């Protein structure tokens, strides 16, 4: 046999020089840069980003998304354009008593935010404030998260760390039940040139604490803007987090979100994510069930239209026994849109009596659209109940007949079923205002949806 | 009202006929029961009348109120006044029951050139009908049939029937999956809709339902056609003798 000489396969691509130039220029102006440890940490992470580069589609987790095409370009750091309260208010959720941090292109808009009257033991702050006031505390929190990063360096997490500028710091002490929801509202306002923003959300719920967190990521003006979000959610023993996330990106925006979730013994999480806009959206979730008897529910829906692209990657780690996780994700692709879902459940050796389920149903509504679904299980315990199921198809002909036999014409029946397919997930939002905003956007995206507006 | 003449139907893509030379005449105000063993073609008949895809009519005619029914789309048949209460009602999670019904009521009104019903009038009527049929108000807010029990689904079909007020109701095995109490309320709902200008075709496997919805005519179907017709006493005869006893081994 003749050996065939191969060129080494390139899994990463080198960053454009603009990143290094920008880092050198901005690094000393970033909040907390006078703290030596934080400064050193930012430099280390940037150096690693430079060495690693950006992932190509040869990297397993990036198989379905050519991220370098949109992210490996010269970008400045986003400025803080003015926004009017009127433009913001329609995205308010959580009711009149909600506590709210509002960010404009990643910068905390203090004058629009409202976090008053916090009970003792609860902290809701801009991360920029924390970086200035208590950089060591932030570093300690970030160091813990870094330990989770077992799969090797994450280019976008490194980039986020290097340019870490703002975001949210939320702490709820042991035994505190927060009745009033917290909303983090991120507005993206397109600028004349290409810009990026690197927010970081840190949420820590103490033992037996309860909170309802609403995250809204909304594009209010089209433009080339990359949001590179890292979010760390820690749910303590016996604690419960209800987490609603609504992603309504505008044209030209790229959203890369890395969500790291850790749950302690008897902790509960209910998360619902709707992706209903944005030129390119990447939702990556790494969830670790670190104690026994944990209940975790991950719901999601994505509906790219035109030439949008949505990529979901979910890894669920059952590390301890008697845990229950349920993933319920649905996708719709129209026009020339592409969507991908890759979900993997790991059941560790000690995680006996795990119940782990994953459902991913997709609706392909155009011949030019594409949906990839890749469910996976990796099980090392012997007494478990695990299942995954993925479907990809068209509207159910039996359901279409049912609606038409009641008098709806074909177009009306198709619109209603398309809406219903996605709406089933939206009904799982904890907050009614988020649900309504999502339903409105869903109707706007549904072909023939104008007929459905009187539903809400 | 409805004239079916020498109807032949095959499953699309298959050569085997399922309905062979079926004829039936239904006049306003009449209730016809169509009984038959599994595979006799009863459900196929109901789907062909309602216009479901997947069947090929290879012969015969169906005329409804002077129109050629077989040329019409399902929604046109609904507008003309045909309603099929299905054996397996479809679940539509994501759409509230009351919204779906309002869409259906107004779609029919639009097709008939009538003004749409206001939301308030609709809700008033819906609540009254739901109470009559024994459907609790929360079922109106829930998604269409999603998570409903077999009996709840059947009641929901009868609620649709009551709201849409068709001229011809086809009930396809409405009794299957119903306990005796549900059977009674569903039957009461159906009987309340019996009027001199409305006809019904009740398709069932068992005689039980016909104790509650008493038919004017009973037809026993086997192997794709009507093998025997008679009055309501035929159902009792059938109950005693069974399909084989009544029709011979061929059944």
Image: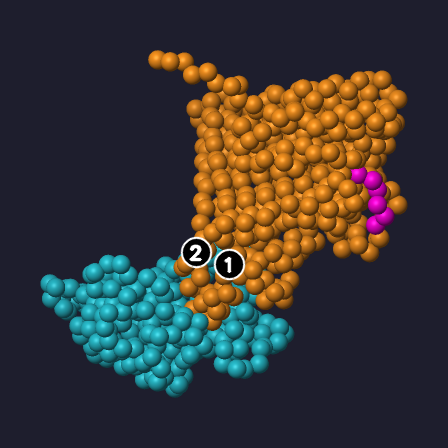
Give the letter of the cyan chain.
B
* Residue A413 horizontal side relative to residue A436, left or right: left
Q: Residues within 10 Å of mark 2 (few under 14, many from 20)?
A: few
Task: Kindly indicate the quadrant of the structure image that contains residue A204.
Answer: top right
| Subunit bearing disc 1 | A
Residue A437 located left or right of residue B176: right
- Pick out the residue farthest to the bottom: B196
The quadrant where residue A285 appears: top right
| Placement of A409 over or under A342, stated as above or below | below
Disc 2 and disc 1 in contact, CB within 8 angstroms:
yes
Task: Tell me the magenta residue range.
Answer: A78-83
What residue would you read off at disc 2? Answer: A396
Q: Could you say where residue A188 lies in the image, as x and y percent from the top left? A: 75, 45
Q: Is residue A79 magenta?
A: yes
Q: Residue at x 44, y 49 (%)?
A: A393
Drawn side of residue A395 relative to residue A294, left or right: left
Q: How is the image coloured?
A: by chain
Q: Position of residue A280 (x, y in %)?
A: 63, 42
Mark 1 neighbour class, 10 Å CA radius: few under 14, some 14 to 19, many 20 or more: many
Tag 2, which chain? A
A292 vs A285, nearest the viewer: A285
Quarter containing the N terminus of chain B: bottom left
* The label number, if any, that marks residue A417 in the structure image: 1
Decide if residue A187 is on the left or right side of residue A332: right
- Residue B100 within the magenta-colored segment of the rendering: no
Q: At 53% from the left edge and 61% from the top edge, which residue is drawn?
A: A415
């Amino acid at each position: 046999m003749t050996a065939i000489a191969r060129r080494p396969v390139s899994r990463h691509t080198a960053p454009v020089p603009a990143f290094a130039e920008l880092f050198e220029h901005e690094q000393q102006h970033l909040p907390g840069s006078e703290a030596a440890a934080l400064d050193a940490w930012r430099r280390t992470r940037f150096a690693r980003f430079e060495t690693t580069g950006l992932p190509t589609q040869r990297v397993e987790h990036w198989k379905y998304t050519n991220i370098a095409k949109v992210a490996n370009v010269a970008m400045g750091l986003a400025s803080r354009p003015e926004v009017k309260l009127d433009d913001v208010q329609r995205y308010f959720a959580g009711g009149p008593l909600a506590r709210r941090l509002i960010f404009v292109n990643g910068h905390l808009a203090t004058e629009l935010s409202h976090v008053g009257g916090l009970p003792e033991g609860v902290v809701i702050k801009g991360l920029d404030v924390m970086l200035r006031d208590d950089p060591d505390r932030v570093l300690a929190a970030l160091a813990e998260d870094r330990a989770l990063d077992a799969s090797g360096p994450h280019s976008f997490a490194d980039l986020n760390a290097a340019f870490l500028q703002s975001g949210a710091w939320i702490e709820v002490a042991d035994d505190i039940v927060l009745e009033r929801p917290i909303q983090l509202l991120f507005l993206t306002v397109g600028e004349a040139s290409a810009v990026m923003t690197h927010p970081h959300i840190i949420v820590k719920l103490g033992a037996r604490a309860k909170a309802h967190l609403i995250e809204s990521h909304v594009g209010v003006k089209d433009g080339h803007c990359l949001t590179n979000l890292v979010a760390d959610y820690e749910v303590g023993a016996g604690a419960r987090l209800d987490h609603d996330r609504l992603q309504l990106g505008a044209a030209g925006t790229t959203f890369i979100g890395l969500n790291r979730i850790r749950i302690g013994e008897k902790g509960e999480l209910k998360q619902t994510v709707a992706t209903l806009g944005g030129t390119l959206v990447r939702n990556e979730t790494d969830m670790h069930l670190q104690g026994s008897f944990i209940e975790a529910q991950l719901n999601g829906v994505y509906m790219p239209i035109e030439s949008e692209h949505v990529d979901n990657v979910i890894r669920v780690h059952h590390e301890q026994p008697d845990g229950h996780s349920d993933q319920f994700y649905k996708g719709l692709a129209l026009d020339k849109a592409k969507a991908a879902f890759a979900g993997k459940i790991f059941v560790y050796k000690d995680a006996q009596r795990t119940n782990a389920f994953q459902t991913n149903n997709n609706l392909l509504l155009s011949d030019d659209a594409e949906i990839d679904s890749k469910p996976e299980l990796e099980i090392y315990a012997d007494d478990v109940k695990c299942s995954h199921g993925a479907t990809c198809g068209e509207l159910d002909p039996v359901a279409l007949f049912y609606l038409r036999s009641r008098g709806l014409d074909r177009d009306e029946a198709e619109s209603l079923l398309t809406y219903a397919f996605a709406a089933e997930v939206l009904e799982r939002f904890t907050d009614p205002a988020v649900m309504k905003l999502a339903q409105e956007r869903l109707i706007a995206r549904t072909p023939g949806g104008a007929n459905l507006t009187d539903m809400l | 009202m409805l004239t079916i003449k020498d109807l032949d139907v095959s499953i699309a893509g298959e050569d085997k006929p399922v309905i062979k030379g079926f004829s039936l005449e239904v006049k306003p105000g009449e209730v016809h029961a169509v009984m038959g063993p599994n595979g006799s073609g009863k459900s196929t008949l109901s789907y062909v009348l309602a216009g479901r895809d997947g069947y090929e009519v290879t012969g015969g005619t169906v005329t409804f109120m002077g129109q050629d029914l077989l040329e019409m789309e399902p929604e046109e048949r609904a507008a003309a006044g045909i309603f099929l209460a299905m054996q397996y009602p479809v679940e539509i999670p994501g759409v509230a029951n009351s919204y779906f019904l309002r869409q259906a009521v107004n779609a029919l009104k639009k097709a008939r050139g009538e003004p749409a019903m206001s939301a308030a009038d609709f809700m008033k009527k819906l609540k009254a009908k739901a109470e009559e049929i024994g459907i609790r108000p929360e079922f109106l807010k829930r998604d269409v049939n999603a998570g409903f029990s077999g009996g709840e689904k059947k009641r929901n079909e009868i609620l649709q029937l009551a709201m849409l007020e068709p001229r011809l109701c086809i009930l396809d095995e409405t009794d299957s999956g119903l306990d005796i109490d549900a059977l009674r309320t569903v039957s009461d709902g159906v009987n309340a809709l019996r009027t001199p200008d409305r006809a019904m075709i009740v398709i069932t496997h068992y005689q039980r339902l016909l104790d509650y919805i008493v038919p004017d005519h009973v037809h026993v179907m086997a192997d794709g056609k009507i093998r025997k017709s008679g009055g309501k006493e035929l159902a009792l005869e059938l109950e005693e003798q069974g399909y084989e006893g009544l029709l011979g081994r061929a059944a």
